[in-house]
């Protein structure tokens, strides 16, 4: 399950702005996007990820995605950084 990959990641980058910065810097190996997040929030980072060849995985819930990162709020976008 995708949430497990997020939990096991040594370094996660939470949030759209931070994920965009990390993708541009070439630090991201995989991107997770919550399906219940607003498209206007997630679309720019998904488009960028696809342009540079970063795999994008969709997950059901931003609440569960946030929980997988160890935070108590939802996360629309989480990137896994190369270690």
Image (tube, rainbow, N blue to C red):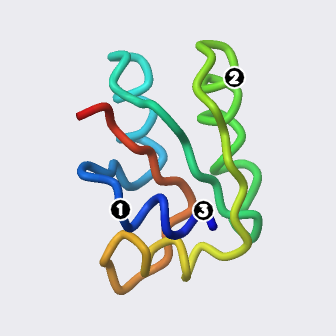
Q: Which residue is mark 2?
A: 50
Residue 17 or 83: which is nearer the viewer?
83
As drawn, is 55 to the left or to the right of 20?
right
Mark 2 vs mark 3, foreground winner is 3
Mark 2 vs 3, N-terminal side:
3
Circle 3 residue? 2
Q: Measured from the top left, where is residue 43 in percent x and y?
A: 71, 40
Label 3: which secondary element: helix
| Crowd around label 2: few <14 · some 14–19 · many ≥20 (10 Å) | few
Q: Residue at x 69, y 23 (%)?
A: 50
Helix, strand or loop status at disc 2: helix
- The residue carrying mark 1 is 8
Residue 55 place in picture, x, y as percent: 63, 32
Residue placed most toward the observer, 55 or 50 = 55
- Residue 41 lies, in percent from the top left, at 63, 50
- 67 vs 77: above or below: below
Disc 1 from disc 3: Cα separation: 10 Å
Q: Which mark, residue 21?
A: none
The quadrant the C terminus occupies is: top left
Q: Residue at x 25, y 49 (%)?
A: 11
């Amino acid at each position: 399950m995708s949430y497990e990959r997020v939990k096991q990641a040594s370094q996660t980058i939470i949030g759209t702005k931070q994920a965009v910065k990390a993708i541009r810097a070439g630090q991201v190996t995989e991107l997770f996007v919550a399906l219940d997040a607003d498209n206007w929030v997630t679309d720019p980072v998904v488009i960028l990820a696809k342009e540079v060849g970063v795999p994008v995985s969709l997950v059901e819930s931003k609440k569960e995605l946030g929980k997988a990162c160890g935070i108590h709020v939802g996360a629309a976008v989480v990137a896994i950084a190369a270690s």
